[in-house]
Amino acid sequence: MIVSTQKPFEEILAALEGGSRVFIIGCAKCATVCKAGGEEEVFRMQEALTAAAKEVTGTMVIDETCHMPRTARDLRSRRDQVDEADFLLVLSCGAGIQSVAEASGKKVVAGTDSRFLGNIRRFGQFEQRCSLCGDCRLNDSGGVCPVTVCAKGLLNGPCGGMEDGACEVDRNNRCAWVTIYERLERQGRVGGLDAITQARDFAHKRHPKSLTLEK
Ligand code: SF4
Ligand code: SF4
């Protein structure tokens, strides 16, 4: 899921300057799970904006703001309240915010910062395990991502800073390459680490990316 966090309220208020009427939009998927833009956060934002002398023309939590046709359809269903607003304040990931901007053509304020693609460890705790590099190396690393879990993204680790299994960048974290070694050792595959892993294909970093499936 996309992990996002709400921007500080003062920053949101500053972005809303020049208008008094606001329509607030949340997302029922990732932003709800990470408590950045679900029903509860939208309600709290409505209360906070009202207390700050803004008029909230309406609120809605769209099922999946990154789904562009559905977002456009849902916004049309509330056209009066949307049209009445000076700003649409969106509490979703950056992809969802852009869906709203494109579908509405109105001034959109991002109420969140999109942080990373996250695994859910437990409720309210998220961990980055994949950076969507487009050239997956998990087959060679025992299912532990060296690009993301190693603080330096090294494909041939560990670096000289590893100490007692801890990462030099943050001693609270285990060195990814120690975890990789231990995992491969348990699987009897540690010999594969003798080979130098070739550099990734950085052409995959080019963006914007798109994908159209064959029918
Ligand atoms: S190598 Fe890591 S960052 Fe790249 S796709 Fe695989 S898991 Fe994701
Ligand atoms: S100590 Fe390990 S995880 Fe940390 S940067 Fe070096 S190789 Fe990567």
Image (spheres, rainbow, N blue to C red):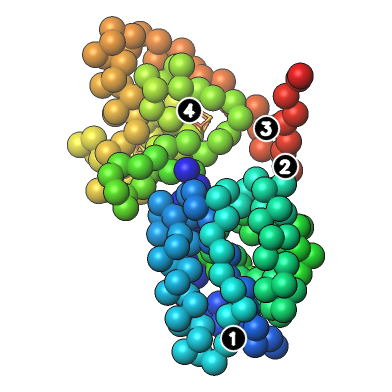
Looking at marks 1 and 4 on the same chain, the residue that comes earlier in the sequence is marked by 1
Q: Which mark is residue 204?
A: 3
Give the residue drawn at x 52%, y 39%. Answer: 131
Q: Nearer the viewer, mark 2 or mark 4?
A: 2
**The quadrant where residue 53 appears:** bottom right
Distance of mark 1 from mark 4, alpha carbons?
53 Å
Q: Amino acid at mark 2?
A: His
Give the camera-side residue of 201 and 121. Answer: 121
- Residue 178 against residue 42 in the figure, above or below: above
Give the camera-side residue of 72 and 110. Answer: 72
Is the shortest distance between ligand 1 and the CB of mark 3 under 8 Å?
Answer: no
Looking at marks 1 and 3 on the same chain, the residue that comes earlier in the sequence is marked by 1
Q: Position of residue 9 (x, y in %)?
A: 48, 78
- Do labels 1 and 4 touch, CB within 8 Å? no
Distance of mark 3 from mark 2, alpha carbons?
8 Å
To which residue does mark 1 refer?
55
Distance of mark 2 from mark 4, alpha carbons?
23 Å
- Residue 121 against residue 27 in the figure, above or below: above
Callout 4: SS: loop
Q: Position of residue 90 (x, y in %)?
A: 59, 65
Q: Nearer the viewer, mark 4 or mark 3?
A: 3
Q: Amino acid at mark 3?
A: His
Q: Nearer the viewer, mark 1 or mark 4?
A: 1
Callout 2: SS: loop
Q: Which mark is residue 155?
A: 4
Q: Position of residue 194 (x, y in %)?
A: 40, 12
Crowding at dot 1, Cα within 10 Å, few <14 / some 14-19 / many 20+, comes out as: some
Looking at marks 2 and 1 on the same chain, the residue that comes earlier in the sequence is marked by 1
Give the camera-side residue of 129 and 121. Answer: 121
To which residue does mark 2 refer?
207
Q: Amino acid at mark 1?
A: Glu
Give the residue drawn at x 39%, y 40%. Answer: 119
